[in-house]
Image (cartoon, rainbow, N blue to C red):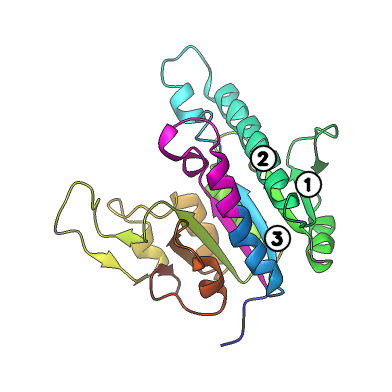
Amino acid sequence: MQENKRVLVKFSGEALAGENGFGIENSILKFVALEIKELIEHNVQVGIVVGGGNIIRGVSAAKGGLIKRTSADHMGMLATVINAIAIQEALESYGLDVRVQSAIQMEAFCETYIMRRAQRHLEKGRIVIFAAGTGNPYFTTDTTAILRAVEIEASMVIKATKVNGVYDKDPNQFDDAIFLDTLSYDEAMQDNIRVMDDTAIALAKDNKLPIVVCNMFQEGNLLKIVQGDTSLCSVVKN
């Protein structure tokens, strides 16, 4: 099957923390870098979005009422920049060409996001990491992943998580949870299904953008997916 030549990979911030639950685990950075390197070696153009939950989550920070939701989300955006720089360093250590583009201007650390510049980087074989979310509060990094994927004209979004895919209910709480290998966008927006938030799913639906949910810790999974093998994943599409 013909490979998808341009994809966007969404990593959760929590996954970078490993068993520590906080911060960044170097062994996971190394694993992520090698998985992305394999894609580049197969001439796949790669965009990356990473969350910031290993450092701070805006929704959680705002719960006590002391910090306003807007400020809490700004803190979360900054957390994604920290993670993006860490992934950039890991990728560069393996000789890969990487650019971090932030939705918020911070020229001392990274480029400011410009769609056409991002597309040009990808065309030149560079990996682009999109940081700071959409640049706006109240929008998740899942929504950012879909938005950036649409803007760079990616063929799919791969949501790399700590589980194999999507279930009809929480498999950690229910022994009879059923694995869903394919589901529609409307099914993905049901309350008991946790793929992405509704805004992200709706944007993907409007643009007919497939979402593949997979286990990021299964070696070689990303390459298999872009080559058309989604047998161990969940796929959200029309």
134 versus 225 height, above or below: above
**Residue 102 locus on image (x, y percent):** 74, 41
Disc number placed over residue 151 in the picture, else none: 3
Identify the secondary structure beneath mark 3: helix
Whole-percent x, y for residue 189 in the image: 37, 56
Give the label, 3 or 1, closer to the camera. Answer: 1
- Say the numbered circle drawn on residue 113: 1
Q: Identify the residue at image location x=47%, y=78%.
A: 229
Q: Position of residue 171 (x, y in %)?
A: 23, 53
Q: CA distance from mark 2 to mark 1?
A: 18 Å
Mark 2 vs 1, N-terminal side? 2
Horizontal side of 222 relative to 100 (left or right) equals left
Residue at 45 percent of width and 40 percent of height = 18
Within-10-Å neighbours for mark 2: few <14, some 14–19, many 20+: some
Q: Which residues are magenta?
A: 6-32
Question: Callout 2: helix, strand or loop?
Answer: helix
Q: Amino acid at mark 2?
A: Ala
